[in-house]
Amino acid sequence: MGENIPHIPVMLLPVLQNLNVREGCVYVDGTFGNGGYTAGILQTPCTKVIAFDRDETVLPRVAEFKEKYGDRFVFFQERFSQIFPTLSKNNIGPVDGLVLDIGVSSMQIDTPERGFSFRFDAPLSMAMGKNDLDAREVINNLSEEKLSDIFYKYGEEPRSRAIARRIVSARGNKPIITTFELVDIIKNFAGEWQAQKIIPRIFQSLRIYVNDELGELETVLGGSEKILKSSGRLVVVDFHSLEDRIVKNFMKEKTGAKSVSSRYAPPTDENKNLKLSFKTVQKNAILPTSDEVERNPRARSAKLRVIEKL
C-alpha cells in the first residue's frame, strides 16, 4: 500500500498535527477517498478510524484497509449528512477528532466517464455517489431562471443569465448529453479565450448543485458538536470561497470570534449569555507550503481550519 497512489492527501502533516492524533484515540475521517488521512492517523499505534465516503468506487481501497488494519478501521458508505445519525445508530462516539476534506477529489476528476471534468469527453454526470439526479438532468430539465441561479450562486459566474439562455436554446434542438457538448455551447457563446474562465465555473456550479455539497457541509458541521468529545478537534480542509465562507463562519460563531460591524463600534452584550461549544486553536487558516504546492498542485488553493470542542 502507498505505491502509485493517484490521490495525494493535501496538507497531511498539518492535518495530523492539528487533529492532535494520539495513541488509543478514535477519529472520524469524513472523506475517506484514497485513504490518505486515514492511513496517516493509523500510523499512530492503537488509534482507530471510523471512515465515511459516499462514493462506491472507494470500496476496493476500503477492502485493502480492512485487511491491513482489521478492527482499527471501520467504513460506512454514507454522505456527510448521515455521519452523525450513522454513528448514533451504531453506538459510536463521541470521538477524539473529525477531519473533512471538502469538494471533489482528484480521483473523481481524473475518471473521465464520471463527467466531472471538462478535459474529457464523457456523459454529463458529476454524481459523487447515489444521487437523485445528475448534471445531464439539471442541464436539460431545469428552467432558464433556475440554471442562471445555479451558475451565479455556486459558480459565481457574472454572465449566468446569458449562459443559461444559450443552454436552453441549444437543448431545444437536441438534448445536451456529454461534457464536450456543454463545453462547445459555452465556447460558441463566449469565444475560446473567455470560455477558459467560464467553463470551470459552470462545471463547479453543476457539481455543487447535483451533490448538494454546501448543504451537506452545513449539516456535518452542525453535527460535529455531537460527534466530538471534550478536547476533540474539528479539522477542515477546503478549496474555494463558497466552502471556506461556510466553514469560517461556523467556526467563528461556535468560538465566539464574530467580528463587530465596525472597529470603532462599542462592544455589545448580545452574545454575553451565548454558550460556546468550541475554542479557537489557530486564529487564521493554515495554507500549504510552496514546496507542497510544487509537489501537489491540487493543494494550491487549500485552506485548513481547526477548532477544539470545549
Image (cartoon, rainbow, N blue to C red):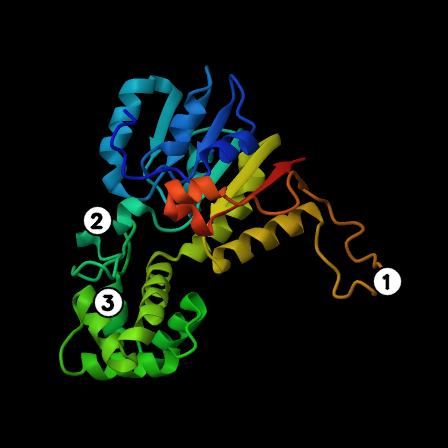
Q: Residue at x 30, y 25 (%)?
A: 65
Q: Which residue is mark 1?
A: 266
Look at discs 2 and 3 and give the one toward the viewer: 2
Q: CA distance from mark 2 to mark 3?
A: 20 Å
Q: As drawn, is 307 to the left or to the right of 10? A: right
In the image, 178 versus 9, the foreground residue is 9
Query: Where does the image place residue 110, in percent across and percent down from the top left?
Result: 24, 49
Query: How many residues crowd around disc 1 within 10 Å: few (fewer than 14), some, or many (20 or more)?
Result: few
Query: How many residues crowd around disc 2 within 10 Å: few (fewer than 14), some, or many (20 or more)?
Result: few
Q: Is residue 179 above or below residue 69?
A: below
| Label 3 secondary element | helix
Q: Residue at x 25, y 41 (%)?
A: 56
Q: Which residue is mark 2?
A: 111
Q: CA distance from mark 2 to mark 1?
A: 54 Å
| Label 2 secondary element | loop
Q: Quadrant of residue 107?
A: top left
Q: Which residue is mark 3?
A: 137
| Label 1 secondary element | loop
Give the label on residue 307, or none: none
Which image quarter is the C terminus in?
top right
Amino acid type at mark 1: Pro
Query: Where does the image place residue 86, in percent across and percent down from the top left?
Result: 41, 37
In the image, 70 versus 115, the foreground residue is 115
Query: Where does the image place residue 59, in percent across and percent down from the top left?
Result: 25, 35
